[in-house]
Amino acid sequence: MPVLRDLFLAMSTNAVLRNFVVRFVLSRRVSRRFVAGETLDEAIAVVKKLNQQGLQVTFDQLGESVTTAAEARAAKDGYLRALEAIAANQVASQVSVKLTQMGLDLNADLCLDNLRQILSKAKTVGTFVTIDMEDSKHTQVTLNLFKTLREEFDNVGIVIQSYLYRSEQDARTLYALGANVRLCKGAYKEPAEVAFPQKKAVDANYLKLAQIFFDANGSSNGAYLDLATHDEKIINWAKAYAATHHVDRQRFEFQMLYGIRPDLQRKLAAEGYTMRVYVPYGTHWYPYFMRRLAERPANVIFLVSNLFR
């Protein structure tokens, strides 16, 4: 349903609608399907439950496109508190970070300084940081900053999106670096000049990019692949391909969003695969929530059914 997808993506950036929906208590309650809570304590409680089910986690403190350096530093401090909470509660969790939340659009040096503090703290805690990918106008600068940070830290990974034409070359470059890469389809509205407009082509490219990491003749030079998808056809393809080509399960994992296909998440963990759940939390849940509605018709049905209960 491309029209519905475009509608929700447009809504995700509409400030007037955001202010209305955020004040709508029922919508906030419904958003808990996809958001672990507005506070760190609420999120930690969710992580503990997921860990008890054999699931790994990556934390995402919601928020993007800050407008001041003070906001960027406050977001960084929030991540430092999250890392302290991970250590104090002894939960199995990494963290995921958006560069615009760290001040990328304001000042690249500010962004780098914030990230270095987060990575240093994560190193002390003994965990990993993944740099989220945002819209295509940020793709190159995000990759550049990742490469800079990877020269200093070994606990940092990056995301690439299969709907972008450029991602095949990016995947080959990152594989050659031995990088940890989260492969997702992409959740932003992009022009046809830079992204595949049809889902079928996005899915086909996803498989092509995964094969770059899988086709390593039994070795991977340290490269690691996070298969971030809820598409059961792709998941089954990955399981079969890895088995047929003798891809060690220590070289990849599956990742899914909190609140989507929890049954499948538990099934993969029970089968012995590393299954990581992307757990967002915080008060800035509106854009994230709208992008989740844009991704799958089933999510819209869930919203409507709850609004009229």
Image (spheres, grey):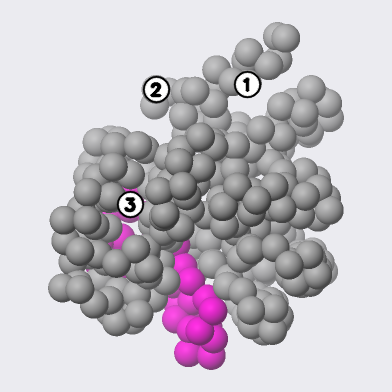
Between 119 and 8, the one lying in front of the other is: 119
| Crowding near the residue tagged with mark 3, few <14, some 14–19, many ≥20 C-alpha atoms within 10 Å | many
Quadrant, the C terminus? top right
Quick one: label 1 or label 3, which is nearer the N terminus?
3
Circle 3 — which element?
loop
Between 158 and 165, the one lying in front of the other is: 158
Name which residue type carries label 2: Met
Between the C-alphas of marks 1 and 3, the distance is 27 Å
* Residue 123 among those drawn in magenta: no
Circle 3 sits on which residue?
Answer: 162
Q: Which mark is residue 239?
A: none
Q: Which residues are magenta?
A: 143-171
Residue 105: horizontal and vertical position, in percent? 62, 66
Hey, which quadrant is residue 92 in on the image?
A: bottom right
Residue at the image point whose x is 81% and y is 48% from the top: 42
Between 246 and 180, the one lying in front of the other is: 246
Q: Is residue 139 visible?
A: no
Residue at the image point whose x is 49% and y is 23% from the top: 298
| Crowding near the residue tagged with mark 2, few <14, some 14–19, many ≥20 C-alpha atoms within 10 Å | few
Circle 1 — which element?
helix
* Residue 161 among those drawn in magenta: yes
Q: Which mark lies nearer to you, 1 or 2?
A: 1
Residue at the image point whose x is 40% and y is 48% from the top: 271
Between the C-alphas of marks 2 and 3, the distance is 19 Å
Residue at the image point whose x is 37% and y is 38% from the top: 231
Q: Which mark is residue 1?
A: 2
Residue 163: horizontal and vertical position, in percent? 33, 48
